[in-house]
Amino acid sequence: MFLTRGTSGKSGSSSVGLGHFSHTWTGRLFPTVAITCALFFVSNFAVAARVLPVRTGGTYSTIADAVSAARTDDTVLVTTGVHTAPNLTIDKSIALIGEEGAIVDAQSIGPMFTVTAANVTIRNLRLINVPTAFTAEHAAILLEGVEHAMIADNRIENCFFGVYAANSQACVIRDNVIEGRQARLTSAGNGIHLWYCRDITITGNVVTGHRDGIYMEFVRSSTVDSNVCRNNLRYGLHYMFSDSSRYADNHFASNGAGVAVMYTSNVLMQGNTFERSWGGASYGVLLKDIRDSRIIGNMFLSNSIGLHIEGSDRVYIARNLFKQNGWAIKLMANCLDNTITVNDFLDNSFSVATNSRQNHSTFDGNYWSDYAGIDLDRNGYGDLPFRPVSLFSLLVESHPPSLVLLRSALIGVLDLAERALPSLTPATLIDSNPSMRPNL
């Protein structure tokens, strides 16, 4: 129907038909399209993620062999059994995954995995035997200047540091069990240690037997939630210079001195349990030089000191339970503009202690189990203010050996003197609206 060359009614004139056009287009572009498609398929096959199994007698008999051969996005699969990997650097974006029963032993030679690449995953491994070192951060997993690392579902045993992150961001450390075995503070590292990091999520971990369960220094905008830290030699959690962070729903029990939050601002502490930290200088929580923070909905149970507050300003403390502590709260005179409201104080030896007759914080609407007032107008609050600082607590603060008199008849005499002469205790440290019933 179409002609490649025809007449237009004039001799010598010609036209190009569709057949010629189609042939020309196909001849010129087909090689280009073919080459492009070929390169596309070759490229995709070339970068397809691989699984590199590590097993005795296999292509990769050691983890180091598999990591060396791996490319970006590959998975190194550590098979069931015991593998050795002292001082191995992971400098590419890969996943290191263990089968059930996969064990990696550092053989007490040195650190285990040092991660220097972004987007590395280490999961489902049992990591053991990283030795103590006094001049280096020997860790089962060291994250060094990385981002988007995922450390999950591992069991770390008998390692100086469990997970150590330095100068890293946007990493997740979750659902690991980290067990230390050192009995002396000087030879123990921290379970999870963060230095100069931001946007780190630490969640669902169980940390025991280390110096500090979780240690954070110069860390910003990070979250610590739903962890269990118990039987650690010093602190369950230790914050230093770590602003704008949150820790919530954690359980801290039987640690040497509970939790310390120091030189920090804008911290939210919510829904945690602090219990059984006993000793001459032990507490559920120590606040030292912190600002503009909130402590909401926590439980302080059976600690020598529930909450120790020193040099801290504008801290909002609400809806917490203080039960069966030696001292529920120790509030030092160098604290300003703190609000302690709607908390419950039950069966503590001392409700509040201070080191001065001056008070610059506000107590309001708390429930005190030792309040003996009445509520004639039935508004739910006592008609008389409550003075939570007893005369005996002031005596103990200035003369600690007098604590041996705690259960003696002398305390009853001091209580009578206090009621007769309330000016003996700090006039400004009162709860003007003590609740008649528990708030929680």
Image: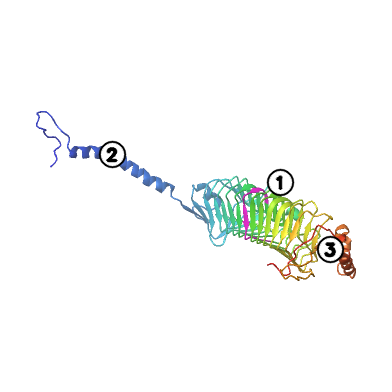
- The residue wearing badge 2 is 29
Within 10 Å of disc 1 (Cα), the crowding (few <14, some 14-19, many 20+) is few
Tell me the quarter of the image containing the N terminus.
top left
Question: Which of the 4 image quarters holds residue 395?
Answer: bottom right
Question: CB of mark 1 within 8 Å of CB of mark 2?
Answer: no
Q: Nearer the viewer, residue 176 or 72?
A: 176
**Number of marks in the rendered image:** 3
Question: CB of mark 3 within 8 Å of CB of mark 2?
Answer: no
Q: Is residue 346 magenta?
A: no
Left or right? Give the position of 351 relative to 128.
Answer: right
Question: CB of mark 3 within 8 Å of CB of mark 1?
Answer: no
Within 10 Å of disc 3 (Cα), the crowding (few <14, some 14-19, many 20+) is many
Query: Which numbered marker is on residue 255?
Result: none
Circle 3: residue type: Ser
Circle 2: residue type: Leu
Left or right? Give the position of 376 relative to 121.
Answer: right
Distance in Å between CA atoms under marks 3 and 2: 94 Å
Distance in Å between CA atoms under marks 1 and 2: 65 Å
Q: Earlier in the sequence, mark 1 or mark 2?
A: 2
Characterize the magenta stretch by its predominant secondary structure: strand
Magenta-drawn segment: 216-229
Question: Which of the 4 image quarters holds residue 105?
Answer: bottom right
Q: Position of residue 172 (x, y in %)?
A: 58, 53
Tell me what residue is drawn at x 62 percent, y 50 percent.
Answer: 221
